[in-house]
């Protein structure tokens, strides 16, 4: 049994070795077939060519450089006031009987604003009227006496001295009438002055009295702001540019309140420096804005645009730099860019003033300049389909 078992194991081993030999021969045959195919593929030239790349222009903002008037801007803080303001009061003192307006009211010319107790003025008017009536009666009597004296002289029963005396009495009576009329007019004016009226169309900005209060002559009772317009009042250092500031434009915007953008122009510059603040008062008339109580006293910021000759400026988006300093991208005739060094004179809020490096008519890249490199092809963003 043992020998038979050993013989069977030997036969199985021989059969396995024979099978391995057959598998190796098959693998060798596959290698011999693949190798010539790979060699043939490597030797065959590629006939398909890669498509050529098309350069796509970069869309940017292109700005044409122009020589234009330059301004030197400085910002000042101030407030809005009425162009014309007035403080009014009664010509004669007295007790306030009625106040007819309040702060913020719009009033028209000759509109009653307040009145004082008019009892004394009414009595004085009655006395003046009585005196005028008495003077007119005396004048009439004197005129009749003069007529009689003249008639008697004509009939030979009178004297020249009597006629002269009648003429003197008539002249004195006429003078009395004139004086009485003057006193009556004064009494009427005094009665009218007990009513305070608006001198022009305006807005009430302040009311400083109440009913029952005793006021003196010319004491301020009501403050008015004329509706002729508004102005911005600024306090500024004594700058050398102020001597040429009359008429220069001013851009105004609100500080605490949201106000519409307003334009103004400098109309008045104080010739003296305020000894308390060390500043100069500048007044700028606001264009096209009627007086509004909501705007009076509002704090504003004004940008004064002083003229500073002529020159070249570019948008701040065009500014870049190289190793030597500031530069801009200029556009060639082939719509490609090149880096051009420039010298900066000064910076403004929205632009850069160029001292040298650019000439009028040159084209520079504004928005989009940060994405460029020398020779890059560009196109104007507004010309894009």
Image (cartoon, grey):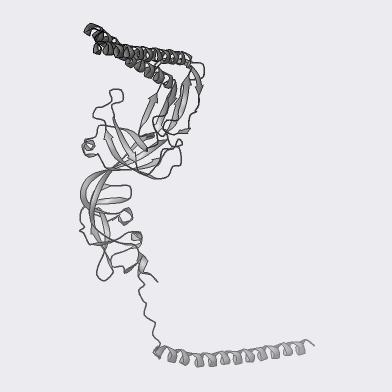
278 with respect to 222 (left or right): left
Q: Is residue 290 visible?
A: yes
Q: Residue at x 21, y 59 (%)?
A: 360
Left or right of 376 in this view: 213? right
Rendered view: 199 above or below 349: above
183 in relation to 244, above or below: above
Q: Quadrant of residue 146?
A: top left
Using residue 181 as the reference point, say whether residue 163 is left or right of it.
left
**Residue occupying the point 66% across, 89% down:** 16
Q: On the rendered image, what quadrant is the C terminus found in?
A: bottom left
Marker count (numbered): 0
Quadrant of the image containing the N terminus: bottom right
- Where residue 40 sits, quadrant-wise, is bottom left
Q: Report x, y in % for residue 186.
A: 37, 17
> Dividing the picture into quarters, in which one does residue 371 lie?
bottom left
Q: Position of residue 205 (x, y in %)?
A: 44, 29
């Amino acid at each position: 049994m043992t020998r038979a078992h050993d013989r069977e194991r030997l036969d199985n081993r021989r059969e396995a070795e024979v099978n391995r030999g057959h598998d190796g021969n098959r693998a060798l045959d596959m290698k011999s077939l693949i190798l010539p195919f790979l060699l043939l593929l490597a030797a065959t030239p590629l006939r398909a060519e890669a498509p050529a790349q098309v350069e796509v222009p970069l869309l940017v903002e292109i700005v044409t450089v122009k020589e234009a008037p330059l301004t030197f801007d400085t910002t000042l803080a101030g407030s809005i006031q009425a162009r014309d303001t007035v403080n009014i009061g009664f010509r004669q003192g007295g007790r306030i009987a009625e106040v007819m307006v309040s702060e913020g009211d719009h009033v028209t010319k000759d509109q009653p604003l307040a009145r004082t107790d008019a009892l004394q003025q009414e009595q004085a008017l009655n006395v003046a009227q009585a005196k005028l009536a008495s003077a007119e009666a005396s004048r009439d009597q004197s005129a009749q006496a003069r007529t009689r004296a003249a008639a008697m002289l004509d009939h030979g029963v009178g004297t020249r001295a009597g006629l002269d005396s009648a003429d003197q009495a008539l002249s004195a009576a006429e003078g009395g009438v004139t004086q009485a009329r003057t006193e009556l007019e004064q009494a009427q004016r005094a009665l009218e002055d007990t009513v305070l009226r608006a001198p022009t169309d305006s807005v009430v900005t302040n009311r400083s009295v109440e009913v029952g209060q005793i006021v003196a002559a010319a004491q301020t009772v009501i403050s008015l702001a004329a509706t002729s317009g508004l102005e911005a009042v600024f306090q500024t250092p004594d700058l050398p540019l102020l001597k040429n500031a009359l008429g220069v434009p001013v851009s105004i915007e609100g500080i605490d309140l949201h106000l519409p953008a307003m334009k103004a122009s400098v109309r008045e510059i104080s010739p003296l420096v305020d000894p308390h603040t060390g500043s100069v008062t500048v007044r700028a008339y606001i264009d096209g804005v009627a007086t509004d109580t909501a705007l009076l006293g509002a704090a504003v910021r004004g940008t004064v645009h002083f003229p500073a000759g002529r020159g070249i400026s570019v948008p701040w988006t065009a500014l870049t730099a190289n190793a030597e300093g500031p530069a801009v991208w200029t556009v060639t005739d082939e719509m490609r860019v090149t880096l051009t060094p420039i010298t900066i004179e000064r910076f403004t809020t929205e632009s850069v003033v160029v001292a040298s490096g650019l000439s009028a008519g040159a084209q520079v890249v504004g928005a989009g300049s940060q994405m460029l490199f020398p020779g890059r092809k560009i196109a104007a963003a507004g010309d894009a389909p």
